[in-house]
Image: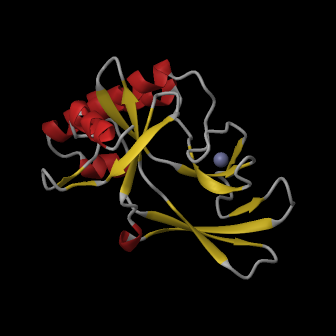
Amino acid sequence: MAFVCDIQIEGDPEVAPLKFCDALYVVADERQLVAFAPVVVWCEVCDSFQAGESPDSPEDIRKHIRDAEEGTFQGVANFLLESPDQIRQWAAYWQRQLTCRLVRQSPPKCLCCGSTAIWGLDERSPNSFVIPSSGKLAALSLTFDESAVDKRLRLYTPEGDLLGEIPRYDPCNNRQFDDSTPYDVVMTMLRTMGL
Ligand SMILES: [Zn+2]
């Protein structure tokens, strides 16, 4: 996905775009990659807006699995999941999320510096945020922008610690890296990059 969050801070004429890179998590026991969607957070250590974590609760994830199995999902899922195969894949996706979530101990982290001193946006007013350190108001606008695709894919442990990053595109196999890429292929790529 290619999301850009345009951020304008009170008193600053510049609009700073924050580009989002998909995050992939590694579950070592399962040898599976698990994709997580980053969200915008305010990080006290970076002293700036960054991509951060906002993991679903295990209860919410279990509900997604139940909904998939019972065919009671709503909204976008209902629209996308037409064949039994798609429904199985949806359930498997949430099962991988649950495996990863259950081993997670740490509170949510900033995906840039790893700090847990982060502030999430208020779901009721996601387009504005008062910066804790300065009291200034920030206006945020999230847009989808294909041209802003981040060419890198970051890999994290289930605890949200950065393992390294690889190019999103795999020229040897002429395809994109994502959570359908075999674990060993991705880890070999990481080692090749000297990590
Ligand atoms: Zn940070």
Q: In this view, does 102 lie above or below 73?
A: above
Q: Left or right: where does residue 68 sit relative to residue 57? A: left
- To which quarter of the image does residue 190 belong? top left
Residue 20, horizontal then vertical, whole percent? 48, 58
Using residue 38 as the reference point, say whether residue 130 is left or right of it.
right
Q: In which quarter of the image is residue 139?
A: bottom right
**Residue 70 seen in this snapshot:** no
Figure disc tally: 0
Q: Position of residue 59 (x, y in %)?
A: 50, 24
View extreme (bottom): residue? 13
- Name the residue: 52% across, 33% down: 161
| Towards the viewer: 55 or 32 | 32
**Front residue of 105 and 122:** 105
Q: Viewed as shown, does residue 118 lie left or right of 60?
A: right
Residue 143 in the image: above or below residue 189:
below
Residue depicted at 61% across the width and 26% down the height = 106
Expressed as whole percent of the image width and height from the top left, the position of residue 65 reads 35, 28
Asked if residue 150 can be seen in this view, the reply is yes
Q: Which colouring convention does the figure follow?
A: secondary structure
Residue 103 higher or lower than 112, as above or below:
above
Report x, y in % for residue 153: 38, 50
